[in-house]
Amino acid sequence: MYKSSQFEEKDADKVLAFMQAHPFITLIGFDGAYPVATQVPVQVCQDEAGMRIVGHIMRKTDHHLAYAKNENVMALFTGAHAYVSAAVYENPAVASTWNYSSVQAKGKIRLMNSDETRTVIMQLTDQYEDAVNSPASFHKMDAAYIDQHLKAIVGFEIKVENIHNVFKLSQNHSATNRTNIVANLSASDDADSKKVAAQMKALD
């Protein structure tokens, strides 16, 4: 990870909020020869015992076998990103750049038993479906259907041991440059560019 103190978010609550707002992560492990990765939705939980990341994966995949073999993993959370053209700088004859937000959470993964996996699926489904009214809510699924599909997946829990972040939002630029960058990104048709502009304005 690119580390620079000027781009590091020191407020742990803001970092947690970012992670919870971007729950579709890249989960990375190591199989002994190469890194392995998969993209999965998760829940990020914080309590007196620390931070936990909970989700599920398919069985008998390269990443499942790697996580079973090596408990050390990294969860990568990414947010909006945007190209920043030096054309809008006070001095445009310099390198352009890219603004983005990212969090890397490293820890140890534990693969769950079938009962724990069922609970994870229920909680994750109810997080995105209306548990009472949605026809796709967990409690409206056929029990046999759930049991059949549970055989193909396994829940996991990561106990987070350390977190690093980069919230690169042109903090190293002059007020004039930042104003110009925000105006340029806000005028873009790209949704991510508009989000980055909003994040930059929130810092001022």
Image (spheres, rainbow, N blue to C red):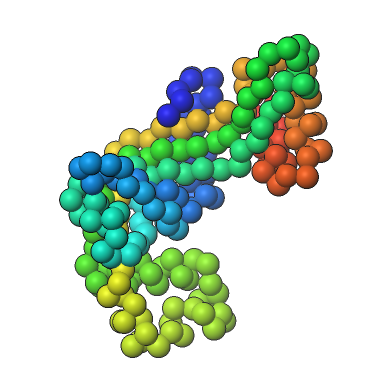
Q: Of residues 80 and 133, which is closer to you in this image? A: 80
At 30% from the left and 54% from the top, the residue drawn is 63
Up/down of 99 relative to 109, above or below: above
Q: Quadrant of residue 162?
A: top left
Up/down of 195 relative to 122, above or below: above
At 41% from the left and 38% from the top, the residue drawn is 104
Residue that sits furthest to the left in the current view: 69
Q: Is residue 46 visible?
A: no
Up/down of 153 relative to 76, above or below: below
Q: How many marks?
A: 0
Task: Estimate the x, y position of residue 107 in percent, counting from the top left.
Answer: 29, 42
At 81% from the left and 38% from the top, the residue drawn is 187
At 78% from the left and 22% from the top, the residue drawn is 88
Q: Split into 4 quadrants, where in the image is the C terminus? A: top right
Q: Is residue 64 left or right of residue 45?
A: left
Task: Estimate the x, y position of residue 182 in percent, counting from the top left.
Answer: 75, 30
Q: Is residue 130 left or right of residue 45?
A: right
Q: Is residue 52 left or right of residue 196?
A: left
Q: Is residue 176 visible?
A: yes
Residue that sits furthest to the front in the current view: 33
Q: Of residues 172 and 90, which is closer to you in this image? A: 90
Q: Is residue 114 left or right of residue 55?
A: left
Q: Split into 4 quadrants, where in the image is the N terminus? A: top left
Q: Quadrant of residue 59?
A: bottom left
Task: Estimate the x, y position of residue 67 in percent, counting from the top left.
Answer: 24, 52
Task: Estimate the x, y position of residue 66 in percent, counting from the top left.
Answer: 24, 51
Q: Of residues 135 and 144, which is closer to you in this image? A: 144
